[in-house]
Image (cartoon, helix red, strand yellow):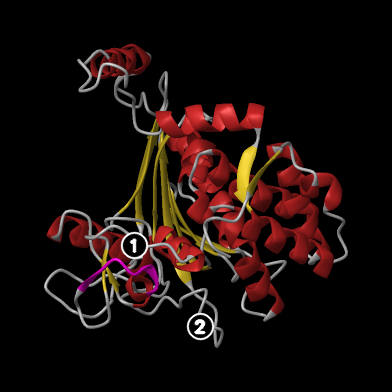
Amino acid sequence: MNSAAPARTVDAQKLQTLIADIFSAEGVPEQDAARIAECLVLADLRGVASHGVSRLSIYLERLRRGMVERVPEFGVSEPSPVAALLDGGNGLGFLTATKAMEMATERAEKFGIGMVGVKNSNHFGMAACYLLQAVEAGYAALVFTNASPAMPVWGGREPLLGTSPFAFGAPGNPPIILDMATSVVARGKIRRAAAAGEPIPEGWALDKDGSPTTDAQAGYEGLILPLGGPKGSGLSLMMEVMAGVMTGAAFGGQVRNQYEKFDAPQNVGHMMVAFKPGIFMGEDYRERMGELVSRAKGSTPVYSDQPVLMPGEPEALRAEERRRNGISLGAADLEMIAGEARAVGVGASAYIEGGVS
């Protein structure tokens, strides 16, 4: 399906209900299905379509092929009062990450800080979903994960590192929600461009021979370039240490590509850190944070019609608008969702076929 295919606007809540119903019909417990749908639709609301409902089919395929457990059995070890290791039981990453952040905030409430590592997990979608989970409960947070190899270590030619996000959140007005890939661009954006037959900007990727390319498929099959050269490579290496080496998950090129490897589970690793934002400054935190935001947003904008916004603020504004007016989905995504609904006996027409417009 090419990029010229017509898009249609659908109601966000109806879409979320449909996605939840599909996962439930696939054997995922109702409450878990609701959380998965919430995270996927939240990505589309915030404009991160590469991690939204367009990935529905691959999550379902891995469930059907036995590569992911519908009802995982979690295991927990606690080496310290403030730290825990969660064995995700090869469950969907949305569920293991949500559980891990819940465990981290519980420890933060009691001790001021909580740190939870995760092994035996899978791709968890958009990292901001778990930052918001913590921030909306009143905590600051860091979210790390590793991923299948797509990027070389600086100076190398073979893919070794994932395009793992560096994600930080802190309460404020507005809150800071920083969720950025350690590559020039998230790999999912190149995958979507390849699926749509669209080119990618020069500087995003190299082909298999190490030559710069604007061919999305060649870039997806080749190497994605690190953000800021050695800096992005170093940050991604940090993710491998924090989420892979330290947790017992796969690391150093061993995380399996969810789209291509169906011989064994991914064994993705995560690391969730939550802490009370006023742990040092108490109630003064809110005043100081407000002052920082005020100074930042009070900066003279480069363009007079584009005000200075905080990290995560553009996405929050976009989500607010799309909750009111709906999410625009292309024909390919609409057809895919309708097809997955039919496959499990869920009627989709009331949710997406009529759309909003």
* Mark 1 Cα-neighbour bin, 10 Å: few <14, some 14–19, many ≥20: many
Q: CB under 8 Å between callouts 1 and 2?
A: no
> Residue 242, percent across and down?
32, 60
Q: With respect to residue 308, does 50 lie above or below?
A: below
Magenta segment range?
Answer: 212-217
> Residue 328, percent across and down?
61, 43
Q: Amino acid at mark 2?
A: Lys
Q: Is residue 160 left or right of residue 145?
A: left
Q: With respect to residue 195, does 257 lie above or below?
A: below
Q: Quadrant of the C terminus?
A: top right
Residue drawn at (18%, 79%) of the image:
157
Q: Is residue 156 left or right of residue 69?
A: left
Instruction: Tell me which numbered mark, 1 or 2, is placed earlier along the sequence.
Output: 1
- Residue furthest to the bottom: 263
> Residue 34, percent across and down?
72, 48
Label ID, residue 163: 1
Q: Amino acid at mark 1?
A: Thr
Mark 1 and mark 2: span between their CA atoms?
Answer: 17 Å
Q: Quadrant of residue 255?
A: bottom left
